[in-house]
Image: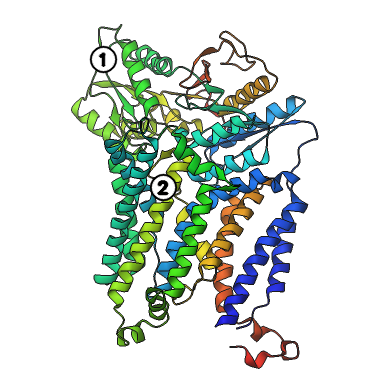
Amino acid sequence: MKRHTPFRIAAAAAGIAMLGSGVLAQEGDKEAVTVVKVTGENWFTRMEEGVKAYGQEHDGIATRQVGPARADAAQQAAIVQDLVAQGVDALAIVPMDPSSLEGILRRAMGRGITVITHEADNLENTQLDLEAFDNAEFGARFATRIAECMGEKGKWTSFVGSLGSLTHVQWADGGAKYMEQFPEMELVSPKNESFNDANRAYELAREILRTHPDIRGFQGGSAIDVIGIGRAVEEAGLEDKTCVYGLGLPRDTSEYLESGAVDGISFWDPKDAGYVMNVLVDMTLKGEEVESGMDLGVPGYEDVTVSDGPGEGKIVRGQAWVDVDASNWKDYPF
Amino acid sequence: MPRRADAQLMFLVALNALVLLSSLILVDRQFFSLFNFQSMGTQVPELGLLALGVMLAMVSGNGGIDLSGIALANLAGVIAFLLAPLIFSSEDAPAAFFLAFAGIALATGMLGGALNGALIGYAGMTPIIATLGTQLLFTGLAVGLTGGSALRLGYVQIIDDFGNMPIWGIPYSFALFLLIAAALAVLLKFTRFGNHLFLMGSNPKAARFAGLRVQSMLFRTYLLAGILASIAGIIIAARNSSIKWDYGSSYVLVAILIAVMAGVRPEGGYGRVICVVLSAMALQILSSLLNFMQISNFFRDCAWGLMLLLFLANARVDWNAYIPAALRGNARQGS
């Protein structure tokens, strides 16, 4: 068999030439790239709005967002590695798996690249890590709404994605701590593990409704817990008697918000997080320090708390949760 | 078929050159910096080693393939992470710790490879089913042992250097990869095992009647693939200072793509180590180039899949049949 190498080379060259449409940043602008866990998910599409908005509203900085097509730590690491080799000015990263980026980020900082992270308060090699809120406070926020809805008395329970998900456990604990002030609130079988599976959450909620027919409060952990709980509540016809609150995404949960099976959800707006990450990038590039009490110019980040992180870097926390119920979920299209 | 082999090699060399040349036009000079080449060099070995394992499995014929590579690599890292600190402390004796880590990982790779080999060689299972099963088994074990979370190796200077730093301008891990590839090439070309492997791959029936010990050959082939996977596991652990069960979940497809692009015949009996090395490099350079050009990563997945199909088709189609006789020249000689 004889091969016609030149043909194939020509074809490949044509193919590659057609792709040569990379968008180039304006000369002189600092290049700040936000790397997310995965592209194409609603959450990160929403985040991209914030990332782009910052670049458009400010001179001297070009912002863009990239991410792997699949949620794979290896693919994300490869992207970061290439960006470091490319010599961008700053990286804002939402790590898939913080520990797997330690080595690359150490080298990035060694090459003078500014590194900002989000949702990675256990990462050592970062200059600033942005957290939307304190996790215990976020849990207490759910508990506040549940207690209010239940009239501060009755049985309630909490869900977590898994006991290994640190943030979920912190929310559940934060909620339970808040409830201690109400003697008539009774926490039953806390921290049910849904394993981030709506079906599992549904089955668990059904079991709980059977064992405790008089249960009134549910606190969801992972973003799909409220969906599972809502389905079980709807089946039992208890929409008006129960109080279901938890982390959730507006569009995914809308059906249950409308029916009243889920009373309210809270989350942080990824658009704001993407915007504020780039605020921090810009400040760090200009050599400005972030201090407690600062106003970063976005609702929820008007009075940030700065504390020491596990490494050299600092952790910046806002109070950026958004409460949503049947009346306003349409304002958040993700 | 020496002519075909040469053409493939030439093609891959040309592909590498072409991608590099197009980078001159498409992106800024930063692409040609030493740092970028070192950065790409550190990214090649883990996939390259897995692709070599896939190549061995494919060459052995009988629908040979190894889907369990990355799962075994991660498992080797997990087990080494759990056992090595029991022997040496990473703080007091980092070198000894790293050796113990590598040793345990290699032993795990051998065991895993032996399991594959036993299932395929001695139990006569179909490779794609057997390695799919062991892939799930290895992944399951790694999840079970770690509870699903990442294990942090922490910053151990010697391990981090091995994973990321260059020696005489070449990253350690890339140099190791080249050494292993060279050793494998020698093994395949000059030893009886190598010769028999190609014979067996091209015609298993004839091989059996010629008195080759087919079962033992298959066993050793998959054992070797397992060892290669565990070396990939060591490099992954060193490069990221951490180990996680689901690291590189996209590598299964890419390793197969590299092997097919290198002209390894999925039906068995043909494959060259140098082509696999070149094909792994071409894919890495292309991948980095796409990142430099800010092209969506969805396009990359799509391009990889398309390339896999193209190369497979290309291996099967005789292009001569579509070229007019007048242009063909020596077409009569075409096979």
Q: Give the chain letter at badge 1.
A: A
> Would you name the residue on which mark 2 appears?
B234
**Farthest residue in the left direction?**
A211
Residue B125: give x, y in percent of width and height. Answer: 28, 70
Instruction: Say whether residue B88 is left or right of residue A295.
Output: left
Q: Residues within 10 Å of mark 1 (few under 14, many from 20)?
A: some
Comparing A139 with B155, the one in front is B155
Residue B312: quadrant of the picture: bottom right
Q: Position of residue B187 (x, y in %)?
A: 43, 69
State whether residue A334 appears in this view. Answer: no
Which residue appears at 55% of the width and 33% of the height?
A105
User: Compared to B225, does A242 lie above or below?
Assistant: above
Three-letter amino acid code at the position of disc 2: Ile
- Secondary element at tag 2: helix
- Circle 2 packing at 10 Å, graded few (<14), some (14-19), many (20+), is many
* Residue occupying image coordinates x 40% and y 16%: A136
Dot 1 falls on a residue whose secondary structure is: strand
- The quarter of the picture where the N terminus of chain A appears is bottom right
Q: Which quadrant of the figure has residue A284?
A: top right
> In the image, what residue occupies the spot 69% across and 64% down?
A12
Residue annotated with mark 1: A154
